[in-house]
Amino acid sequence: MLLVDDDPGILQWFRRALERRVTLTTACGPKEGLEVFDRDGPFAVVISDMRMPGMDGVEFLSAIRDRDPNTVRIMLTGHPDVETAIDAVNRGSIFRFLSKTSEPEELLIAIRAALDHRRLLQSRANLLEARLRAAQRMELVGRSAACVFHDIKNMLTVITLEAEMGMLQCEENPRAREHFERINRAAGDVARIAQQLVAVGRPVEREQLAPLCMDAFLHEFYGMLRSAIPKTIVIDCDVPHELPVIRADAGLLGQALLNLAINARDAMPEGGKLEIAVSVVTVSDDEARERGGEAGGDYLCIRVSDTGVGLERAQLARIFDPFFTTKRQGNGLGLSLVIDVARRHHGWVAVSSEPGEGTSFFVYIPACNQQNATEPKTTMAEVECDRS
């Protein structure tokens, strides 16, 4: 913490009052304060006197903000008044406004609150930086795949045609025909992987998203899902009537949900229960921005849950990374595609899992403003906590 005041007596009083409680650096006057900040900073908290020669506290803390926006700034004055407080808050973005007559314990309370605020700002900055790096990696993967996709497709066309010709010529040799069929299936798998790679990082503009009626979409999706999931897995689909309309790319959204369902299937090799539930949740602006959304409001939450093996904490930390997989076989692109699709729809994905207790994925998509759901609304925390 850096304390700046033009009165050496005040600095000495603070050093005695806060001794052994905080790591305190002092500077006599604003000029020395900026020199100390540039030399020894950044500081988590800067406390400045209001009235100082050459530069008042508002100007000084504004300069500190320009040097490091994450530094929490506190104003200290012996002559508090409303105009000074308003100016300090508006120009210096002051976190707290304290009187010089404050007791040491009151100062410590303000400092602890400032440190908590600093940690919150740093956590958000780290989260945004991590998301930026992830988005850059996804874009690089998509661009790299797009460069070679056409060449791969041409080679796969030759492989597929040759395999089909081989199958036609092996009608009387079942064993040879089986080999050609495996070649044909493998070529199809490679084509799907290449398409997933191209999809990751491919920009989807707003005008490509069209109004989508979720009732009809999920009803159709359930029919397709039933043919892809073995009979040993029970599918429970809870879709309320009159859900709000969302703006979505039906193909991309269906692919993302199918990837989640396939993951759930693979997590239950001996059978189990796959549950798909949809609800309308109200999200605050802070919650939306913290998760990667654009603004608060009503969101459609699509939950895909299984009763499978669950995930370890270390796996949860990397679950959405490209090429990371918990399966013996797999390319690790399924969940990367899911989170990429959610972001393109201006939403996000959350996950809840415990080893042996199954896994739940929550896909949040903003509802169109002109539509109102008749179903009761809940908060995002209530939806996720209820499952976990």
Image (cartoon, helix red, strand yellow):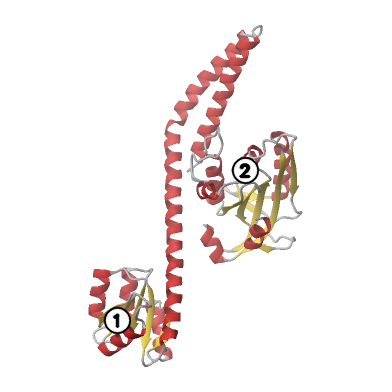
Is 325 on the left or on the right of 106, as rendered? right
Say above or below: 23 vs 287: below
Q: Secondary structure at mark 1?
A: strand
Earlier sequence position, callout 1 versus callout 2: 1
Say above or below: 72 vs 269: below
Q: Amino acid at mark 2?
A: Leu
Q: Which mark is residue 119?
A: none
Q: Residue 119's x, y, as percent? A: 44, 67
Q: Nearer the viewer, residue 168 or 73?
A: 73
Q: Nearer the viewer, residue 354 or 247?
A: 354
Say above or below: 119 vs 27: above
- Quadrant in the picture for residue 274: top right
Q: Residue 192's x, y, as percent? A: 55, 32
Is 32 on the left or on the right of 338, as rendered? left
Name the residue carrying label 2: 260
Name the residue carrying label 1: 4
Q: Nearer the viewer, residue 372 or 265?
A: 265
Residue shown at the point (42%, 78%) measured from the top left: 111
Q: Counting other residues with Cα less than 10 Å from the Cα at mark 2, is it few (<14), some (14-19), or many (20 or more)?
A: many
Q: Counting other residues with Cα less than 10 Å from the Cα at mark 1, is it few (<14), some (14-19), or many (20 or more)?
A: many
Q: CA distance from mark 1 to mark 2?
A: 55 Å
* Residue placed furthest toward the top: 172
